[in-house]
Image: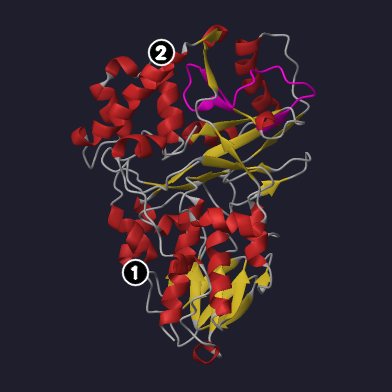
Amino acid sequence: MQRRKFIKNTLGYPILLLTPSLFTGSCNKGTDNDAKGKTVVIIGAGISGLGAAKKLKENGFEVIVLEAQDKVGGRLSTNRTLGISFDEGASWIHGVNGNPITSLAQQAGMKTFQTLDDSRKSYDTGGVLRSTSSYNTAEDELYTILNTLTNSGSASQSFEKVFNNLYPAKANDRLWKFLLSTYVTFDTGDIDKLSSLLYNEGEEFGGGEKIVTNGYDTIAHHLANGLNIKLGQRVSKVDYSSAKAKVTHNGNVTEADFVLITVPLGVLKSGAIQFAPNLPAAKINAIQKVGMNCVNKFLLTWNTAFWDDVQYISYTPEIKDKFNYFVNVKKFHPTVNALMTFAYANYARQTETMTDAQITDEIMAHLRDIYGNNIPNPTNMLRTKWQTNENAFGAYSYTAVGTEMQHFDDLAEAVNNKLFFAGEHTEADYFSTVHGAYMSGMREAEKIIDLV
């Protein structure tokens, strides 16, 4: 299921060809002499922080990366406890043509597999196989609706409210609940909070969708090589009132000429980091107004496979956002019998209060409705809890009711040429994506380089 597929297919956004020098260290503006003695503290070792750190180091800065976790990568987090790579955060390269992650993945030795959207089967309740034509017809109608719904939108109304007003017969239709869940909520955010004017904002790259097969964190480890990264360092305060900024972490204070904050939007919303003086009003407002979605992922393994030999299996239950979409991991790991499924928005948050056994029972109820009561229980289950993860407090940003596109630029705005901000939530064109996060780190590194 291609993320933001409806934008690519129907809205006609151009594919942007980006300047190669933005993503490489080959064109260094600063020199060792320019940057000599200049220190940059980067808060967060996700892809934006690591990318910026690498570029700044190449330009002669002394760079210190402070990371709260015991590993690098941030939301590029890979769990290998079952012998395969389960990416807890990002899984796909969304649009490989011109995407900086494509070349970065090659440099890092990251392996990918092109997933095919048309390799799918859709089941209704009772295990009724839905005809391809009926699914395709509904999908085509969804694209048309998504291309026109903004005409009826308003700044104060959510996507869900406008959609239900325009298409009341679809509001309780199981297939339509599935389509809105996996094509809209998954790609954006909570549909009852999603802006009815801005749901289709954001550019995308062309080309196929490729899922990572050996772990997205391979990029993080590649970028981290040779950097001064201090793990287990939770930043609690950034004081930028003096000539040098003072960053408090684990009771220690590190001084810097520049500070780059790359923590997720959810962490900024939580107030976990104190700023002295307070951040500008426009930035505080943007932190509050831009939404933070929650998507949780679940990987289940079996001794033998019992499901269809297709890439995607969808199921249309009565409850939206609930284990309605299965990725057949066996298609790209032939020796592994595994399915990956998802929960979105409020149901995703609800799963974080449930036990592993409860989660497994709910997932198996759907699979047994499709394939019969005799299918076996899984041998293992892995899960994520992004909403309560203190290092993220959510999955990625989205355009909520009350969000303005200017807010993304406000999030990216430097403060006093001393504080800088990166992360997917600071990229107006590519928010909520890995490539957006990486591009934001390159952008902020360039800003700092230009100052010396």
| Dot 1 crowding, Cα within 10 Å, few <14, some 14–19, many 20+ | few
Determine the residue positioned at 65% across, 27% down: 359
SS state under label 2:
helix
Which mark lies nearer to you, 1 or 2?
Answer: 2
Which residue position holds label 1?
280
SS state under label 1:
loop
**Residue 180 image point, x, y percent:** 40, 27
**Residue 91 image point, x, y percent:** 58, 43
Question: Is 92 rendered above or below residue 373?
Answer: below
Do we see residue 299 in this rendering?
yes
Determine the residue positioned at 41% across, 19% down: 136
The amino acid type, in three-letter code, at marker 2 is Ser
| Dot 2 crowding, Cα within 10 Å, few <14, some 14–19, many 20+ | few
Q: Nearer the viewer, residue 15 or 282?
A: 15
Residue range in magenta is 299-326
The amino acid type, in three-letter code, at marker 1 is Pro
C-alpha distance separating marks 1 and 2: 52 Å
Which residue position holds label 2?
134
